[in-house]
Amino acid sequence: MSQYRRSYLPGGTFFLTVVTYQRIPIFLEPENITLLRTAIAQMRQEKPFKFTGAVILPDHLHFLWTLPHKDSNYSQRVSRFKTLFTRSLPNKCLLNDTISASRRKHRERNVWQRRFWEHTIKDEIDLKRHLDYIHYNPVKHGLVSCPHLWQYSSFHEAVKNGIYDKNWACSCQDIKPKIPDFVGMICGE
């Protein structure tokens, strides 16, 4: 059994990767993205935090969350939005009629992988690299050619806030993009 221990830092910023069960692309359906956003909004009302960055991909999600000053419980938040989202799915959206005995025992459906991946952000350089990773991820996975073309990302808000130029890592109009360096990063994919 794994001896992995999560890092809990009150008021910390955390990079999170949450993956669907067997990488089923449930977020190709726009209505499922709406249900996910509703679940996360409800969870944030219950347990507030700041969204620093996010991207929704067909089979996984990446987040950068900054928690309140004396709060370190991102695990509870992940569990809560996963539960809220799963409960919101209509029965016809259940992914598999045959749920394993282990999943039945834990009262789980075939929607999410049990665990999620987390990294505690150490400093501004680490934050910038993970924010770049989030915003470049749709390009990395071949979903779009430029970050600005993916609508389910915090990239557009970051451009509005002056964090990125709208042409960051862009290859439109035959521009050769400067690809961010993600060497050495482990992001739970």
Image: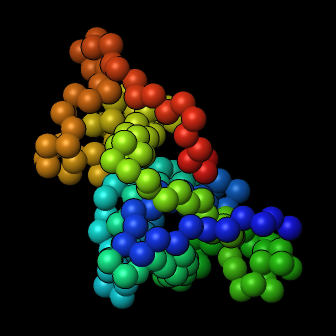
User: Residue 86, image x and y in percent?
Assistant: 55, 77
Tag count in the figure? 0
Q: How is the image coloured?
A: rainbow
**155 vs 81: above or below:** above
- Image point (61%, 63%), residue name: 116
Q: Residue at x 13, y 47 (%)?
A: 160
Q: Residue at x 61, y 51 (%)?
A: 188
- What residue do we see at 83% from left, 74% from top? 100
Locate residue 89 relative to residue 43 in the image: left or right. right
In the picture, the quarter occupied by the N terminus is bottom right
* 82 or 67: nearer the viewer: 67
Q: Position of residue 110 (x, y in %)?
A: 69, 70
Residue 138 visible from this viewpoint: no
Percent position (x, y) of residue 66? 35, 66
Asked if residue 32 can be seen in this view, the reply is: yes
Say which quarter of the image contains residue 24. bottom right
Looking at the picture, tell me which residue is in the foreground, 168 or 33.
Answer: 168
Asked if residue 123 lies left or right of residue 97, the reply is: left
Q: Is residue 47 above or below residue 33?
A: below
